[in-house]
Image (cartoon, helix red, strand yellow):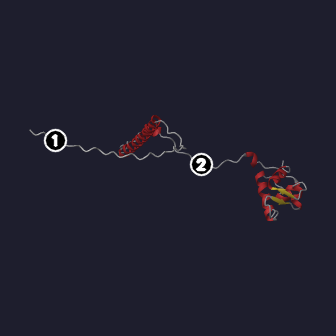
Amino acid sequence: MAVAKKKATPKKVTKKAAPKKKVVAKKKTTKKAAPKKKAVAKKTTAKKRTVAKKATTTRKATARKATSRKKPAARKTTTRKAATKRKPAKKAKTKRKPNAAFMRPMTLSEALGAVVGHKPIPRTEVTKKIWIYIKKNKLQDAINRRMINADEKLKKVFGGKKKVSMFEMTKLISKHMK
């Protein structure tokens, strides 16, 4: 009887581990991340928003399609009752009526009558005629167009002033009308 020899198992060779290097921990400058629960909650609300937007746009699109598919209703014959229900046609726009106070003829003083004329005329016409006189005689200042250089006739109307502004002119003219 032969005894079987056991095979010798080779011993495992273990490698010596290399000496570990010291790792220096670096300080993190970034902020801590928010907890995952909150981030998940934000994602779900964002998803809900996009789903809601899509739903409203699809509703609008289907509403448009539905209205475009409708056929026009058959024209009904009009009866006297239907004719009475109709609204009257819009009136054509009329010109504004002038205010009676502006259109009332005013009596003018002798100084103003020398420039405009001695007939009683409305305020609006007085202003127009004064401007015609100013432009005809080139009494508007060349540099500052708001100013009016008065001649002998206008000096009497303006109370002896040589230069008067447009706005002051109307005030001074109103004193010569009754």
Residue on which disc 1 sits: 5
Q: Is residue 122 visible?
A: no
Location of residue 173 in the rendering, given as x and y in whole percent from the top left corner: 83, 52
Q: Residue at x 47, y 40 (%)?
A: 86
Q: Does residue 50 sit above or below 116 in this rendering?
A: above
Q: Residue furthest front?
A: 1
Q: Secondary structure at mark 2?
A: loop
User: Which comes before the other along the chain, label 2 or label 1?
Assistant: 1
Q: Are marks 2 and 1 in contact (CB under 8 Å)?
A: no
Closer to the eye: label 2 or 1 = 1
Closer to the camera in the image, 175 or 37: 37
In the shown orientation, is residue 129 left or right of residue 32? right
Q: From the viewer's side, name the closer residue of 67 and 33.
A: 33
The tag on residue 93 is: 2
Measured from the top left, where is residue 52 in percent x and y? 42, 39
Question: Crowdedness of circle 1 by 10 Å Cα count: few (<14), some, many (20+)?
Answer: few
In this view of the protein, which residue sits in the foreground, 23 or 158? 23
Residue 132 x, y percent position in the rendering:
78, 61
* Residue depicted at 78% across the width and 51% down the height: 123
Q: Amino acid at mark 1?
A: Lys
| Element type at mark 1 | loop
Q: How many marks?
A: 2
User: Hey, which quadrant is residue 73 in on the image?
Assistant: top left
As shown in the figure, which amino acid type bears the numbered disc 2? Answer: Lys
Q: Which circle marks residue 102 in the picture?
A: none
**Quadrant of the drawing holding the N terminus:** top left
